[in-house]
Image (spheres, rainbow, N blue to C red):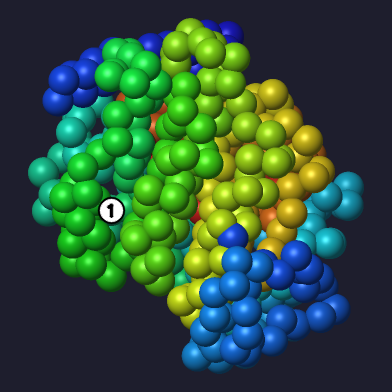
Amino acid sequence: MRAKHLFLLLLLSLSTLTLFSNCTGNGKSATKGSSPVSGDGKSENGDTIVKSTYPPLDTALYDSLNLRLANGDTNGYWPVKKAAYPLPGAILPFKRVVAFYGNLFSKKMGILGELPPNEMLAKLKGEVKNWEKADPKTLVVPALHYIAVVAQGDSGRDGKYRYRMPFKQIDTVLYLAKKVDGLVFLDVQVALSDIKTELPLLEKYLSMPNVHFGMDPEFSMKDGSKPGKRIGTYDAADINYVSNYLAELVKKHGLPPKILVIHRFTRKMVTNTKDIKTRPEVQVVMDMDGWGDPTLKLGTYRHWIYPEPVQFTGFKLFYKNDTKKEPKRMLTPAELMKYKPIPVYIQYQ
């Protein structure tokens, strides 16, 4: 039943996309017990490393907050023991990110594009308040998670079945995020393209301190299938490429750590999870992306997120698809606060 629910969502999303048919670390991560030191130097590609201007990381506080997120886990998975300490200026776990997901060209791909901008931002503020009420100890930062490269049903001119959003649309998302003092995530669905081709095209935005990145294995069709025919996949090597690329930007521009969100709702969507590297410059979030009733979603989280720890976890809530069947409601912030581990990135679609 879980697979059926997920594929229905895939087909629903892709059916809306045919309208588009015309239209980087030094190789060594700081681990717990060592605190990274910022300073001028050279990155792997020869770029000058800009010295950080953020206050030093409070490692004791960082550890205590991660222990709190583990929520009493006794199986040894959480908190993650060998993850890198972040550079100064890190968002997680000091704050929780609450994001609205979607695309400005479609009302069916998520709440971000479904509502008029001001109404959407007002609703986002409401969700932020809900999370502040459920967890008063954690500051909440709003975010817009924008699908910057969209998998589509039409092959396009190059046969890659993906559509790159015009930069003016990304500029609009940046403008909207500024109105709520929020973050921006640029999400990529590569389809028959690949992450090494699509990621560099967004570098000018990812060089900004408030812009982060999302990669969606669901639409990474390495076997040449059309997106929506089956669920795609990324390997740890793909994720490590992205995190290294982002790390190089962080060092080059003296940025705070980037957040990298990877969507997941099956095991095969992300292979060799244990080989995913953590770096001081990048904070990795494995985001539970499946939809359905509360029991189904909890099961997905327990099977594909909880037992394969990387660094942090996220959880996606669907305003429509989560409410189709009994009990016809989304999980509440209070309910998610009982999960092990507690998700620190929340996405609404």
State left or right for residue 199 relative to residue 128: right
Question: Is residue 283 depicted above or below 88 in this figure?
Answer: above
Q: Secondary structure at mark 1?
A: helix
**Residue 12 in view of the camera:** no
Q: Quadrant of the C terminus?
A: top left
State left or right for residue 80 relative to residue 159: right
Residue identifier under label 1: 124
Q: Position of residue 187 (x, y in %)?
A: 41, 43
Q: Position of residue 300 (x, y in %)?
A: 64, 28
Q: Residues within 10 Å of mark 1 (few under 14, many from 20)?
A: many
**Residue 46 in view of the camera:** yes
Residue at the location (28% across, 70% down)?
Answer: 181
State left or right for residue 86 relative to residue 132: right
The answer to which quarter of the image holds residue 97 is bottom left
Question: Is residue 115 depicted above or below 179 in this figure?
Answer: above
Question: Is residue 316 depicted above or below 206 in this figure?
Answer: above
Task: Pick the residue in front: 254 or 273.
Answer: 254
Residue at the location (29% across, 18% down)?
Answer: 156
